[in-house]
Image (spheres, rainbow, N blue to C red):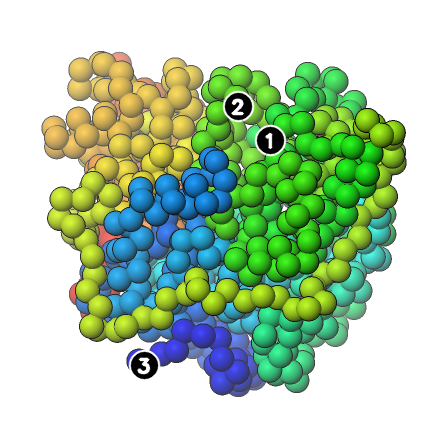
Amino acid sequence: MASKIETTPEMVKNVYSKTAERLAVVRNRLNRPLTLAEKILFGHLDDPQNQELVRGESFLLLRPDRVAMQDATAQMALLQFMLAGKSEAAVPSTVHCDHLIQAYKGKDADMNASNMSNKEVFEFLATTSSRYNIGFWRPGAGIIHQVILENYAFPGGLMIGTDSHTPNAGGLGMCAVGVGGSDASDVMVGLPWEVKNPKLIGVHLKGKLTGWASAKDVILKLCGMLTVKGGTDKIVEYFGEGTQSISCTGKATITNMGAELGATCSVFPYDDRMGGYLKSTGRAELADIAAAHKDILSADADVVANPGKYFDEVYEIDLSALEPHLVGPHSPDIARPISAIKKEAAEKGYTVEISSALIGSCTNSSYEDIGRAAFVAKQAMDIGVKMNQPFLVSPGSTQIQKTIERDGQMATFNQVGATVLANACGPCIGQWKRDDVKTGTKNTIVTSFNRNFRGRNDANPETLAFIGSPEVVMALGLAGRLDFNPMTDELKGPKGSVKLQAPVAPELPAQGFIPDTEGYQKPAGAAAQVAVSPTSDRLQLLTPFTKWDGKDFVDNYVLAKAKGKCTTDHISPGGKWLNYRGHLDNISNNMLLGADNAFTGEIGKGKSQLDGTTHEFAQVARQYQKAGKQWIIVGDENYGEGSSREHAAMSPRFLGCTAVVVKSFARIHETNLKKQGVLALHFINAKDYDKIQEDDQVSLVDLKDLAPGKNVKMIIKHKDGSSETIELKHTYNAEQLKWFRAGSALNLIRGL
């Protein structure tokens, strides 16, 4: 094999050597101190001598060290990679089966059901990975981000992953960025990865966490400070003495949920807590190598001393004064300290009785997290209190599961009433078959997950999902009420009452972790045969999109005008649709099912301009496509926030979309649209959004002259015969315009 999959000491030494060489060139050009994020990004530049480095403007061409893919998005990423005709992945790459496992009855039953229902998909991923020298982690081995942290992440590295929570690896000092499958396939083909040079947010952590406050509360507070789009096209870099008081896995919790800010990624400087984690997970040599290169694994001294000179924005959080937080419902940036939830719940009429408590996920399933939650549970059991509602636990990996079984935390969870789920994403991504509450019934859940958009966890739009730390979720679940404050209220039980002590737990197991020796499949190489049935309704080999014909888009219909929040969950819902992630035709039937129609207020449906009838948007699009009519989508602010799923871009392209015109885009979705050959355009004047009417036809003209920085003219023809012209802007650079003209980025690659 030409490339190894493991993060070996030799690989890390080579990365540090190349980083030092590139940084020497960049320092000579910039002549100023560098932040940690800059050191990692600039240390991976494809051409450090000539690339422009203007923050927020220049597009960087970077050479990532790794690619990571989860099973739902890996299907399309691998199908695209196969089109390129390469013999193996050009960089170390892995696939992790964690998204297609539905939570229902418990680990064993759910794994059996998943292995049966997803057999052909898992076989496709396993055989394709084996054929192209890609590491494959079997179903149940663990959630992608936890497995990456345990096995592959390393300080100072650059990784891209086909999941929006890839930044989890920032807890180990890595710049890890969520991308669409097209970006992943490009890098696996051997091309550099392109991203806009992010602006930098510096977060100064001072003091030390105490009492009930945890690492989770750091990011929950920051989400409240910055909102879900406060980190768009930005990297969040943490610094200050407070960083050293947080465990490595606690740092990973913080960087994981940086995705909820829309941030490109988040990163912490290297310290002994990271070194301890590397040693505990069998990578002591990497810890020694990192310790010898601290100069490139932390910001320069003047950056820390004078952050305002080097960051575009600077915030401060005093860990010593931080109180446990809850965020929600329906958005991860609705934040308040737990002491404020009782009054707010009464004022806003929240259902305070908790219907389910859920602990785990890629965000909070570390040994420390589980231990702190178990500490709380033991106190409750001493007074005879157990969970009165469903209590679901999602261990992050087989390694964590086996270790907490050995050390007793799992026994505590079982005694308090847990249903232990598979080592998979489950309810965090909507893979939750829920029988206890009917859809449409108002109820409240508390989770230690990362996302709580309306309907995300259980497909019930009336479920109020509140996010907190595992120990807070445990306390609230035991009390059975959202308005319980574990810092002040007493928990009452058959054997008395108790004011819960603040949780404590070791961050690492004294006896070390029990490694997973069965979850990984080594590749076989060219001898492996890729398994795809031509009659499958779940897998479909791709054919290239058509090349742009060089003509303007004239008299396009407005398929949909989305109002308000329109995430990738709204554009391409998960749940049952996860079954079709490898079949572009079938999954396209879910397009815009969650979008709020600005014209009618109806969800997921719009009017056909051909016959005036109302259907689901995908069916209207197919009607237009059959009639040879092109169409566009109009969107609101931060259109396409949330998960990295590229199907939200591929489905519109597949069904005939020419352009998506919005007030503003979320970063990953905008890039995904560009990659698939859909014009991604912005209203210059946000109020022009209001000019688009249901029966309009729009034309995008002079496209042959499309160039970086040059506006696009849109002519709007109204039903009454009147028309008006507006200007649209875009963020395409010269290379990205080649994608558009070729019909997609993949078409351009195939032509190389």
Rounded to the nearest angstrom, the CA distance separating label 2 from label 1 is 9 Å
Give the residue number, with chain letter if any, for mark 2.
436
Q: Which mark is drawn over residue 390?
A: 1
Does any portion of residue 304 appear in the rendered image? Answer: yes
Q: Quadrant of residue 579?
A: top left
Q: Amino acid at mark 1?
A: Pro
How far across and how far down the image is residue 427, in percent?
A: 51, 38
Identify the residue at horizontal 23%, vertical 20% (top origin): 608
Q: For mark 1, give the secondary structure.
A: loop
Q: Nearer the viewer, mark 2 or mark 3?
A: 2
Does any portion of residue 307 appear in the rendered image? Answer: no
How far across and how far down the image is residue 365, in percent?
A: 61, 51
Is residue 694 found left or right of 272 in the rendered image? left
Name the foreground residue: 723 vs 494.
494
**Above or below 57: residue 393:** above
Is residue 35 found left or right of 187 in the rendered image? right
User: Are there few (<14), some (14-19), or many (20+) residues within 10 Å of tag 1?
Assistant: some
Of pointers 3 and 1, the one earlier in the residue sequence: 3
Q: Amino acid at mark 2?
A: Asp
How far across and how far down the image is residue 9, in percent?
A: 52, 83
How far across and how far down the image is residue 116, in percent?
A: 31, 44
Rounded to the nearest angstrom, the CA distance separating label 2 from label 3 is 52 Å
Of pointers 2 and 3, the one earlier in the residue sequence: 3
**Above or below 628: residue 693:** above
Is residue 207 found left or right of 609 in the rendered image? right
Q: Nearer the viewer, mark 3 or mark 1?
A: 1
Identify the residue at horizontal 40%, vertical 28% (top origin): 594
Asked whether the beta carbons under mark 2 and mark 1 sit within 8 Å of each other, the answer is yes
Q: For mark 3, give the secondary structure.
A: loop
**Above or below 368: residue 688:** above
Give the residue number, with chain letter if any, for mark 3.
2
